[in-house]
Amino acid sequence: MLNTPLISTSKKKEKCVLVGLITKDQNRDKTKEYLDELAFLATTAGLITKKTFTQSLPTPDTRTFVGKGKLEEISTWIKINPVDAIIFDDDLSPSQVRNLEGSFKDIKVLDRSLLILNIFSQRAKTDQAKKQVELAQYQYLFPRLTRMWTHLSKQKGGVGMRGPGEKELETDKRIVRDRISFLKKKLEKIDKQSMTRRKERNRLVRVALVGYTNVGKSTLMRVLAKADVFAENKLFATIDSTVRKLVLGNIPFLLTDTVGFIRKLPTTLIESFKSTLDEIREADILLHVVDISHASFEEHIDVVNQTLADIDAYDKPTVLIFNKLDKYEPESEEGLDDHLATEADLEQNLARLKSSYLSKNTNNVVFLSATEKENISELRDILVKLLSEKHFAIYPNWDPKQNPLYDWQGDYNWEEQGE
């Protein structure tokens, strides 16, 4: 098991600097946006960002990611302003990490993937999520054993441990391989149990909330289910799936809140979270939540769609939900409105968006504010239609009064409780 957190969990917050590149494929504005997101990730992990460094290079330097001059600039700055970690906005190769750690000595060197893995480790609550994250960490760190696993390379005794002439690195790799194998077996067992539970729920239509991280999925879940679902203005506030049984239009269904996606999501996480992502893959209807107030919401849509395609869950009936209508600030000749949204602003924004190209891209589009509970009724109407199509395709003669699937007494009924 991973013994030492990559980022301290003590009350004293650690300081960090961020490093990003402006390349032929990523202009200055896009690099700034990615670094802003990296800073948000660092804050979520409990770090304080003190400075951001950028450099223009056609491609990352194969030895140290940044060039020699930029490396000296960063080294000079941190000698005057001590920090605990340096975080790079792209994945680093094992050799790059080795060279950078040689340059920065006792300062931790992390890349974007390692930072995300650390956040997942902090957020994991269930036994399944903890094992999924630990497996992803081991798989990611395995090629980097020479720098990360010195605590595993101590002399071992006993039968079946170090063989004649076996090198410490080989011992380390064998220990980690054994742990990876153990975690995979444990997760397979948990996955079988999860599959059994999902099969027991197969008689119900299943709806899954998906979207980029921090777009308001959990907040919308709380509004729809009137449930005490954890929601926070941080990236990856929720990584464990939450399932609630609801009734809408006299039709029972299951609503699942799932982990948020993000650009450059570590592939090891996608592999390790297979069981959790199965909730999306096996859903009948997807509610794709988008933060309409974010400047790059269109790119966020593309990231989510690509991830859905990667897990074979793209081709499903989908409702595109543009959330945070209350924070949406339309561009005008005078710039962006800087006042808080009033009820009149919400109505004006809603009318403007409904007539925009966004509402014409797909059949099922809703603009709403989960926090203000604005325009939830429109989502209800669309969802009733999709639920009816799915439910009555399975049960063409179903009557909830004469032949209930379950005893629904005590379940949340959206219609009885109101919005």
Image (tube, rainbow, N blue to C red):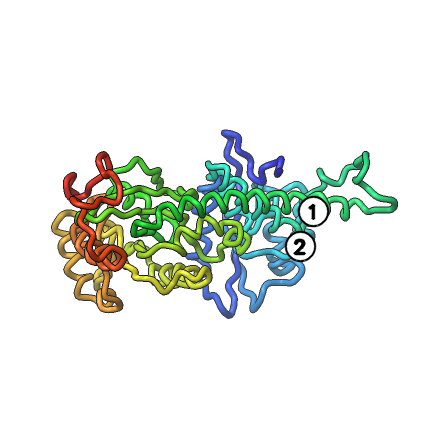
Callout 2 environment at 10 Å: few (<14), some (14 to 19), or many (20+)? some
Report the residue marked by disc 2: 94
Q: Quadrant location of residue 157?
A: top right
Secondary structure category for the residue under label 2? helix
Residue drawn at point x = 57 percent, y = 42 percent: 186
**Frontmost residue, 398 versus 112:** 398
Report the amino acid beneath label 1: Arg
Residue drawn at point x = 32 percent, y = 50 percent: 203
Q: Position of residue 322 (x, y in %)?
A: 26, 56
Report the amino acid beneath label 2: Pro
**Frontmost residue, 40 versus 212:** 212
Report the residue marked by disc 1: 147
**Side (left or right) of 363 relative to 56:** left
Secondary structure category for the residue under label 1? helix
State whether residue 4 appears in this view: yes
Q: Position of residue 59 (x, y in %)?
A: 58, 67
> Which mark is drawn over residue 280?
none
Q: Quadrant of the C terminus?
A: top left
Residue drawn at point x = 17 percent, y = 62 percent: 352
Q: Position of residue 101 (x, y in %)?
A: 67, 48
Q: Which sits earlier in the primary sequence, circle 2 or circle 1? A: 2
Q: Quadrant of the N terminus?
A: top right
**Side (left or right) of 4 relative to 241:** right
**Frontmost residue, 68 versus 27:** 27
**Side (left or right) of 147 relative to 59:** right
Q: Name above or below for residue 190 compared with residue 23.
A: above
Q: Tell me, yes or no, whether the two marked residues, 2 and 1, touch with CB atoms within 8 Å.
A: yes
